[in-house]
Image (spheres, grey):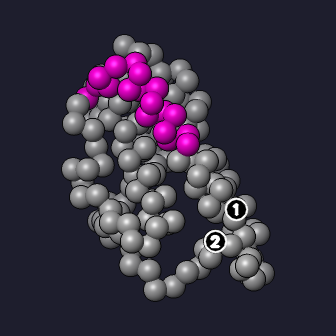
Amino acid sequence: MPIKDPHGKQLREHIIYLLNGGGAHARFDDVVKNMPEELRGVKPNGLPHSAWMLLEHLRLAQWDILEFSRNSKYKSPEWPKDYWPKTDAPPSTAAWNKSVQQFRKDLKAMQEFVTNPKTDLYAQGIEFPSAARREKPINIGGCTAALARIVTK
């Protein structure tokens, strides 16, 4: 049964706007489509992460948020070690492409979750995962901006 909420439509629309990159420095697809293969594992001067590291961080963090949102028994991975890849570079072009596709798939699932009128966006009494209790929360827009900076250097 749909949740009755006088502001639900506007809230859902705004969340979808944000998930689609609204207000971000750069949109995910705009950045990854132009990422040169030879730069995917390179840490640019002055930056702590390579494009691969940022892509995997985005994918893992988004997956964590999605699973937490749709599964009340979900347990978040250990922060920070399980939110970053083990290497600076992707092991292959296929690994890069798989990560991009999984990010898109999980984003679509989150969009469907948010737009589902049966989803209670105001649910009370949930225990936030470790991701929500961090001193430095995941900044997906900031990661996308860092990816864009690598492409434009």
Give me the residue at 49% from left, 58% from top: 66
Q: Quadrant of residue 47?
A: top left
Dividing the picture into quadrants, the one containing residue 15 is: bottom right
Quarter of the picture holding the N terminus: bottom right
Is residue 150 visible to the viewer in this orientation of the structure?
A: no
Q: Is residue 44 above or below residue 82?
A: above
**Above or below for 105 versus 37:** below
The reply to whether the magenta stretch includes residue 99 is yes
- The answer to whether mark 2 and mark 1 are in CB contact below 8 A is yes
| Kind of residue at badge 1 | Thr
Q: Residue 115 shows which numbered tag? A: 1
Q: Is residue 27 above or below residue 65?
A: above
Q: In the image, 42: left or right of 122?
A: left
Task: Read off the residue under disc 2.
Answer: 119
Helix, strand, or loop for circle 1? Answer: helix
Taking the spot 72% from the left edge, 70% from the top edge, the residue there is 117
Mark 1 nearby-residue class (10 Å; few <14, some 14–19, many ≥20)? some
For residue 29, above or below residue 75: above
Locate residue 112, reporting x and y percent.
65, 56
Magenta highlight range: 88-105
Q: Position of residue 91 (x, y in %)?
A: 29, 23
What's the residue type where badge 2 is placed?
Thr
Helix or strand or loop: what does disc 2 sit on? loop
Q: Residue 58: image x %, image y %?
A: 42, 44
Q: Residue furthest top?
A: 38
